[in-house]
């Protein structure tokens, strides 16, 4: 047991190094072995990569096992975390993204980006900002020891809001009225990244507790899956960066320019949600996922809508692609900050899923 714990600690302690190595490995694979991402790219349903979906499922499953439905019901006793994350995702983030993209692409970078290109880049940024993530946030919550019940409820609420708010917000900010939303992508994402791992985790929890008891489940069974999330994350990065290597190598300067407002949006929205949780005295295991949900993007949906509206070769798609590239490193940085500042908040024992 001690050896296993040390191995997991080693991965987590040097996670940034592993992430950088996997990003580099993915770029090299895309450059020198393009047959691999080409073959993997054909394995998709409704614009969702099947290999990435499987890896995300592997990452989410250990956290879903921790969800106690009594704790889900108890969320209504303290809804502040859900209100903060949802408010940040829908009342702050899309408009902040539009403002930052407009500022940087039309003013700060005016000498480097043409007006036509700036318009396309703003459109891509808005598509990213108007859709909060529904999958990877479970991973970020796991890495910050977030409350699984609250994380699940926060994500579920965002999934419902996406159905009615995504199109109106994008239409308002971009002045586009004929938006095509790939509903199959949207619904399949919810099923793959929330419903299936939740059902699998719940069944596992029930069976193990029934056979071995809750004490065994909490102290012996769940810790066995401690390293799976990290390994799944690293393999996902290799695949993603093998897909996006050309975008980085062919347009490195524009990738850097695009990344500036995207990263600022991630950091500012996360800081806002985190601060609001501190003001309203939320425990850390609620504040952490609330902040990270507010900062993350549903890039599968954003990329799919960008392709449907503007075509695969459009600069709009490049922006949503850069969103994929920047999100993981930025979110890992935010995870590190959130973990370092846990002492600013109550411990969260009163809201644990146990």
Image (cartoon, rainbow, N blue to C red):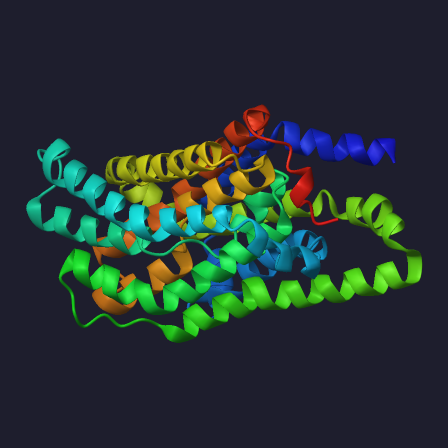
Task: Specify the quadrant that holds the N terminus.
Answer: top right
Give 85 or 308, whichever is nearer the viewer.
85
Judge whether 243 appears above or below 141 on screen: below
> What residue is at 60 percent from the left and 40 percent from the top?
285
- Indicate the position of residue 160 as horizontal and vertical percent values: 43, 66
The residue at 20%/54% (across/down) is 123
- The residue sitting at the front extreme is 77
Is residue 6 positioned above or below 154 on the image?
above
Q: Position of residue 74 (x, y in %)?
A: 63, 55
Residue depicted at x 64% and y 39%: 145
Residue at the bottom extreme of this rendering: 184
Query: Where's residue 46, x and y in %?
Result: 43, 72
Q: Nearer the viewer, residue 132 or 308?
A: 132
Q: Is residue 229 visible?
A: yes
Q: Quadrant of residue 345?
A: top right
Residue 249: quarter of image: top left
| x then y, percent, for residue 230 | 64, 42
Total residue callouts: 0
Of 348 and 122, which appears nearest the observer? 348
- Horizontal placement of 221 versus 92: left or right? right
The front one of 6 and 72 is 72
Is 322 positioned to the left or the right of 45 in the image? left
């Amino acid at each position: 047991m001690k050896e296993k714990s040390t191995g997991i600690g080693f991965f987590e302690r040097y996670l940034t190094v592993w992430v950088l190595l996997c990003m580099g490995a993915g770029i090299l694979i895309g450059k020198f072995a393009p047959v691999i991402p080409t073959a993997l790219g054909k394995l998709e349903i409704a614009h969702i990569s099947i290999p990435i979906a499987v890896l995300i499922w592997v990452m989410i499953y250990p956290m879903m096992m921790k969800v106690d439905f009594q704790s889900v019901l108890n969320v209504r006793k303290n809804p502040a975390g859900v209100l903060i994350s949802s408010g940040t995702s829908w009342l702050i983030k899309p408009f902040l993204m539009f403002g930052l993209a407009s500022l940087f692409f039309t003013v700060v970078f005016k000498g480097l980006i043409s007006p036509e290109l700036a318009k396309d880049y703003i459109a891509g940024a808005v598509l990213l900002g108007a859709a909060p993530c529904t999958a990877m946030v479970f991973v970020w919550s796991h890495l910050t020891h977030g409350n699984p019940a609250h994380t699940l409820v926060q994500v579920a609420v965002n999934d419902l809001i996406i159905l009615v708010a995504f199109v109106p917000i994008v239409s308002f900010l971009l002045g586009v009225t004929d938006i095509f939303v790939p509903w199959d992508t949207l619904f399949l994402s919810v099923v793959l990244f929330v419903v299936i791992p939740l059902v699998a985790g719940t069944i596992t929890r029930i069976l193990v507790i029934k056979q071995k008891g809750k004490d065994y489940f909490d102290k012996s069974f769940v810790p066995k899956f401690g390293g799976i999330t990290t390994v799944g994350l690293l393999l996902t990065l290799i695949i993603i960066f093998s897909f996006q290597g050309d975008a980085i190598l062919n347009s490195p300067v524009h990738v850097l320019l695009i990344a500036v407002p995207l990263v600022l949006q991630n950091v500012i929205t996360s800081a806002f949600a985190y601060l609001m949780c501190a003001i309203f005295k939320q425990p850390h295991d609620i504040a952490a996922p609330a902040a990270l949900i507010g900062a993350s993007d549903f890039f599968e949906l954003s990329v799919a809508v960008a392709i449907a509206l503007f075509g695969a070769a459009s600069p709009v798609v490049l922006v949503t692609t850069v969103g994929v590239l920047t999100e993981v490193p930025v979110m890992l940085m935010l995870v590190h900050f959130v973990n370092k500042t846990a002492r600013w908040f109550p411990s969260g024992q009163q809201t644990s899923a146990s």
